[in-house]
Amino acid sequence: MSKPRILVVDDESILRMDIKEMLIEAGYDVVAEANNGELAIELASKHHPDLIVMDVKMPKMNGIKASRIIHSSFGIPVLLLTAYSETELIKEARMANVVGYLVKPITERDLIPAVEMALGQSERVKVLAGNIKDLHAKIEERKRVEKAKGMIMQTYKVSETDAYERMRAHSMKNRIPMKEVAEYIIEYGKLGINPLEAKER
């Protein structure tokens, strides 16, 4: 199993080095380092890490703005580092889709569990997004089948059950998915050709 790939972003070189060492010792792969938000976006685009550990207060572009851009552009989760624990900051971080934050000073005891939780949360979000995508695809497929079924009902003057059975029989006979049967029916129906006969030609 490959190591989780992490990008470390902090304008303090000593802290950045400390975090890098802690992550490497814990078995992570630190793919790149940056000292500001603009460079973080550039490196995120180049390396597509599994997680970005990023400071909030940095020159050129702060961590929250960079997190917002990185999330919308690449969908990469960000774990923020901050010297503050203010309510307003937490609100801003949530709006930027940050998966978590740590208050400095950073210790290995705090960092590694936070990284693990951030990676785990990110994985769950990916699975959920995949499930939602699959669900949308199934709904769209169902809509196409229903439309095709309606066309068969109208063409052959049969009931809904009979129309579906004709489609299913055609699917089994030709060894093609119902989705393809529906697409052919819709396509040829628009051309004024008898839908089920068209496929058999």
Image: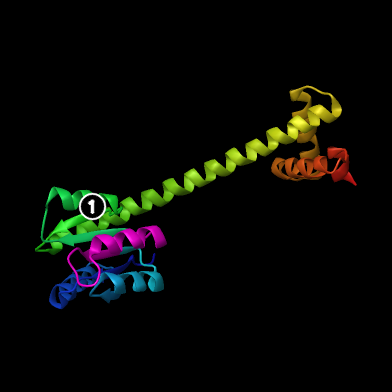
Q: Residue furthest left?
A: 105
The residue stretch that appears in magenta: 52-76
Q: Residue furthest front?
A: 60
In the image, 145: left or right of 94? right
Choose top left, top right, bottom left or bottom right for residue 115.
bottom left
* x 24%, y 64%: residue: 63
The x and y percentages for residue 3 are: 34, 67
The x and y percentages for residue 32 are: 30, 75
Q: Which residue is mark 1?
A: 92
The x and y percentages for residue 1 are: 39, 64
* x 78%, y 28%: residue: 163
Q: Nearer the viewer, residue 93 or 112?
A: 93
User: Can the viewer see residue 24 in this picture?
Assistant: yes
The x and y percentages for residue 118 are: 28, 55
* x 27%, y 75%: residue: 33
Choose top left, top right, bottom left or bottom right for residue 43.
bottom left
Residue 50 belongs to magenta span: no
User: Can the viewer see residue 30 in this picture?
Assistant: no
In the image, 61: left or right of 185? left
* x 27%, y 68%: residue: 27
Q: Nearer the viewer, residue 174 or 76?
A: 76
Choose top left, top right, bottom left or bottom right for residue 73.
bottom left
Which residue type carries mark 1?
Glu
Q: How is the image coloured?
A: rainbow
